[in-house]
Structures are given as C-alpha cells and as structure tokens.
Amino acid sequence: MSRLDAAQLRAAVGNCIIGREIIVLEETTSTNDSILQRVTSLTPEGLVVFAEHQTAGRGQRGNRWESAPQKGLWFSILLRPKIEIDKSARLTAWAAATLASAIHEQFSLGATVKVPNDVQLDGRKVAGVVVEMRAQENAPHVAIAGIGINVNHAAADFPEELRSSATSLAIALDRQVDRAKFATALLRNLDRAYTESFGQK
C-alpha cells in the first residue's frame, strides 16, 4: 500500500486555494485537531492536513469515525469563508455534495448525500463530513472541514457493528483505488466548488 506524499499531492493539485499547502501525518488524534493546533490569525485558508491513521477521528454528533490505517482518505481543510458562524451547514452541504459528485465523476458510482453530512453508496455510508467553526480574536473566524472516505477497505476492515451499514469504494468497484489520484481529483473539485459557492478568489 503506497503512502500519501505531500509534495506529490501539492504538485498534482496545481494552482488552487484548497491544497495550497498540504501536510501528511502518519498518525494523529484527528485531522481537525491537527489543523486547530497549527492555525494562527496569519494562516491562509486552504491548508490541508491528511493522516494515514486517526486515533480519535470524529463524526457528526460526537460519533467516533473509524479510520483503518492507509485504507482511506482522512483529511481536514482550513477555510475562512465569509459567512456567519451559524451558517456552517452551508459548508457541510458543499463538502458532501462535492464528495458525491467526485465519486460519481471518477468511478461512475451512484453516490448520494444523506443529509446533512453522509455520502452513501446503495444505502451504505462511504464518506462523511464534519465542519467545525471557531471564532478568532482580532481575525476572521475559521472553519475546519473534516472529510473521511472509505477507499480501500475490505468488509473485514470495519468493526463488526458497522459492516452492514458501511462500505468502501473498493467494495463497490471490486478493485483497489489509487488514493493519491482520487485525492488530487477531489481537492481540485472541492477548490472549484468552494470558489463558486463562497466566492473567495
């Protein structure tokens, strides 16, 4: 299994806001936490932190997100959207819709959004989004969009209690997926859709 390489991803993504800086960690508690630890009032939006393994990945409503090492894409994006802090649902909708369309575009799979924050294939969860917004003293508030995608999981990689409700791209396609190639396409799609929806460029 090939590890993600930050320099290769950064070069492949090209000229963009989302992905202007990319960090790949071997392990962290959660990528949202990792971004919060790094952000200052001067950190430009678009920083993306990937982790090959999360020990405490978070889903919606405090649920734990299972992230099998090197099987999926677990990452968070630092954003500075010009929206009110109570409008974070707009960011969740943007990320979930972009995820579903990228899965369809790259793999011809019928991904659907289960509102507010899940992406499903045939009624089983393949990806999820969790957005946290934080007020910043003397600076525009920040949003951290955390995204988790089950990419190369086999059924045995899921905890037993999730096997009937979770799936992966590999299970749906019956083949392994190039994580770096999909990550590049996804970051480009997210950047384009973010610019269109939130008018940052």
Image: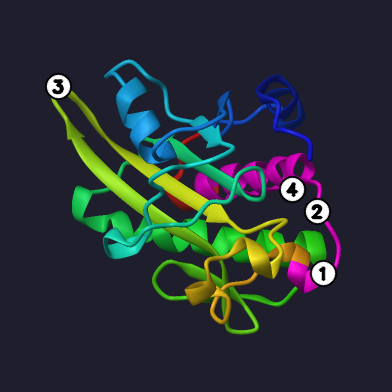
Task: Check if mark 1's residue and mark 3's residue have beta carbons within 8 Å.
Answer: no
Q: Estimate the spatial distance between the alpha carbons at disc 4 and disc 2, rounded to whole Å.
A: 8 Å
Residue range in magenta is 171-195
Task: Check if mark 1's residue and mark 4's residue have beta carbons within 8 Å.
Answer: no
Q: Secondary structure at mark 1?
A: helix
Say whether residue 26 is magenta: no
Looking at this view, name the residue that lies furthest to the left: 137
Give the x, y percent position of residue 147: 50, 51
Q: Which residue is mark 3?
A: 138
Closer mark to the observer between disc 3 and disc 2? 2
Q: Which residue is mark 2?
A: 177
Q: Which residue is mark 4?
A: 182
- The answer to whether any part of residue 104 appears in the image is yes
Q: Estimate the spatial distance between the alpha carbons at disc 2 and disc 1, rounded to whole Å.
A: 9 Å
Circle 4 crowding by C-alpha within 10 Å: few under 14, some 14–19, many from 20: some
Q: Which residue is mark 1?
A: 173
Prevalent SS, magenta region: helix
